[in-house]
Image (spheres, rainbow, N blue to C red):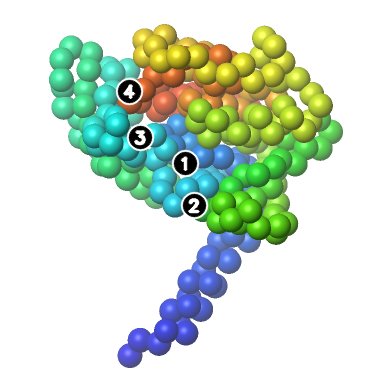
C-alpha cells in the first residue's frame, strides 16, 4: 500500500542528504550544457567530487534544441570521438560532417556523467560568487524560481577548490567576477570581451584556445570561453563544445 507522506519523506530526505554532501566539492560547474556535462564526466571518472548547477529545468544547453528546434546536431571528425565513447550514434552526412540526434546526445552525455559520480542540480541559479584572498572559492546559489519571481529571498552558499563557468553565451560567472571583484580577468582587455557573429570554422578552433583559467580558480569552457575572449559563435555544431569540456577537465586534473 502506497502512502503519500512516505513518498514525500523519501524525496525530501534523499535530496537534502545529497545537497548537504555537495555543499563542499572539489569542482563546481555552472551550466549543464555539453561542455559542462563533459567536464563533469571526465572529472568524476577520476574520482573528483564535482557538482553541476543548472538554472533551467532541462539540461543540455543549446544542444537540447538542435538547430532551430530541429532535433539534430552536427559533429565534426574531431568531436565524433567523444560521442563514440559515450555510445551515442552518429551518421555520416558527408566528408567531415556527422549528424546525431540531439536528444540522444544530451541524455547520453548526462547519463554517463551521473553514472561516473557527478551530481547535477537543476533549477539552481548561480547568482553570485565567493572570493577569498583574490581567489574564487565558491558559488552563491538560489532557486531559479526565486529569481524569476523576483522574490527577495537570500541565497545559500557552497565551497569549491575550482570552478568552471560553462554558462554559454552569457558567461554569467565571469561577468559576476568582473563586476564585483575589482580585479581584471586574464583577457586582452581585463574584462569580458563578448562573442562575435557566427563563424563556425573559426569559432570551433578558437573555443579550445579559449578554454583556460581566467581568474584564480575560475575556468571557462564551452561557448562561455568564446564569449569571454571575443570568439565567434558556432551555431548547432558541437564538437568544439565537447572537446572544450574534455580539455578543461584535463587542465583541472593536473592542477588538483
User: Which comes before the other along the chain, label 2 or label 4?
Assistant: 2
User: Which comes before the other along the chain, label 1 or label 3?
Assistant: 1
Badge 3 element: helix
User: Which comes before the other along the chain, label 3 or label 2?
Assistant: 3
Judge by depth and name the residue closer to the eye, 62 or 222.
Answer: 62
Q: Which residue: 50% across, 31% down?
A: 168
User: Which comes before the other along the chain, label 1 or label 2?
Assistant: 1
Judging by the rendered image, the residue that carries numbered circle 2 is 122
Judge by depth and name the residue closer to the eye, 47 or 192.
Answer: 192
Judging by the rendered image, the residue that carries numbered circle 4 is 237
Badge 2 element: strand
Quarter residue 255 falls in: top right
Q: Is residue 140 left or right of residue 3?
A: right
Measure the alpha-carbon separation of dots 1 and 2.
8 Å
Label pair 1/2, CB-CB below 8 angstroms: yes
Q: Which residue: 51% across, 28% down?
A: 169
Q: Quadrant of the N terminus?
A: bottom left
List x then y, in percent, for residue 9: 51, 78
Judging by the rendered image, the residue that carries numbered circle 1 is 32
List x then y, in percent, for residue 64: 34, 39
User: Which comes before the other along the chain, label 1 or label 4?
Assistant: 1
Amino acid at each position: 500500500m502506497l502512502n503519500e507522506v512516505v513518498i514525500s519523506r523519501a524525496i525530501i530526505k534523499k535530496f537534502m542528504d545529497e545537497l548537504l554532501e555537495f555543499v563542499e566539492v572539489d569542482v563546481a560547474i555552472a551550466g549543464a550544457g555539453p561542455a559542462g556535462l563533459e567536464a563533469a564526466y571526465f572529472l568524476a571518472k577520476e574520482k573528483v567530487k564535482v557538482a553541476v548547477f543548472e538554472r533551467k529545468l532541462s539540461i543540455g544547453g543549446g544542444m537540447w534544441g538542435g538547430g532551430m528546434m530541429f532535433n539534430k546536431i552536427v559533429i565534426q571528425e574531431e568531436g565524433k570521438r567523444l560521442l563514440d565513447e559515450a555510445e551515442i550514434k552518429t551518421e555520416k552526412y558527408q566528408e567531415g560532417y556527422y549528424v546525431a540526434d540531439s536528444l540522444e546526445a544530451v541524455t547520453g552525455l548526462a547519463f554517463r556523467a551521473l553514472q561516473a559520480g557527478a551530481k547535477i542540480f537543476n533549477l539552481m541559479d548561480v547568482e553570485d560568487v565567493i572570493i577569498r584572498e583574490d581567489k574564487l572559492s565558491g558559488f552563491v546559489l538560489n532557486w531559479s524560481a526565486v529569481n524569476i519571481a523576483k522574490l527577495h529571498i537570500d541565497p545559500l552558499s557552497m565551497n569549491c577548490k575550482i570552478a568552471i563557468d560553462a554558462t554559454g553565451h552569457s558567461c554569467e560567472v565571469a561577468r559576476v567576477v568582473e563586476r564585483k571583484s575589482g580585479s581584471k580577468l586574464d583577457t586582452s582587455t581585463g574584462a569580458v570581451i563578448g562573442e562575435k557573429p557566427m563563424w563556425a570554422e573559426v569559432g570551433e578552433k578558437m573555443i579550445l584556445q579559449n578554454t583556460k583559467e581566467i581568474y584564480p580558480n575560475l575556468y571557462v569552457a564551452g561557448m562561455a570561453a568564446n564569449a569571454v575572449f571575443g570568439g565567434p559563435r558556432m551555431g548547432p555544431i558541437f564538437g568544439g563544445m565537447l572537446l572544450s569540456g574534455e580539455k578543461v577537465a584535463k587542465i583541472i586534473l593536473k592542477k588538483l
